[in-house]
Amino acid sequence: MPSRRQIEEIVEALREEHEGGPAFAEAVDAYAGSLDDDEREVLREVLLQRADQEAAFQRGVALRLQTRGWFRRQLDKLDPPGGRTP
């Protein structure tokens, strides 16, 4: 029986190998077929945790872009692109 850590490492290896997307999902599905019910539950938990982490990362990126946009607009008010207005 693989430990949670081993399952996490396998999921990471599959993600790196397949770079996400449908191929990754198919590889995880194939891996899940080799596990018993308890191990599949651990795999499910690992995948849900990774999905939450990815969602948090994407929210952070979106917030950073939004903040940068606000900051850039404030600077543009002080010094518009193309030079100062008279």
Image (tube, rainbow, N blue to C red):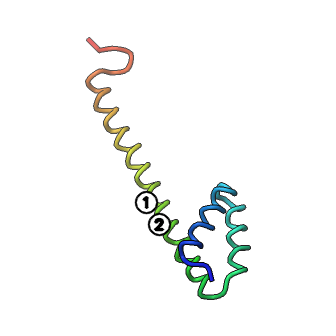
Say what secondary structure mark 1 lies in.
Answer: helix
The residue tagged 2 is 52
Query: At label 2, which amino acid type do we have?
Result: Asp
Q: Nearer the viewer, residue 1 or 45?
A: 1
Q: Residue at x 29, y 28 (%)?
A: 75
Task: Tell me the distance, in whole angstroms, between the alpha carbons under discs 1 and 2.
Answer: 6 Å
Residue 56, which numbered label? 1
Q: Quadrant of the N terminus?
A: bottom right
Q: Residue at x 58, y 66 (%)?
A: 9
Residue ranking furthest to the bottom: 37
Q: Residue at x 69, y 56 (%)?
A: 17
Say what secondary structure mark 2 lies in.
Answer: helix
Q: Residues within 10 Å of mark 1 (few under 14, many from 20)?
A: few
Q: Position of residue 47 (x, y in %)?
A: 56, 71
Q: Nearer the viewer, residue 24 or 1?
A: 1
Q: Nearer the viewer, residue 38 or 22?
A: 38
Q: Residues within 10 Å of mark 2 (few under 14, many from 20)?
A: few
Q: Position of residue 21 (x, y in %)?
A: 66, 59
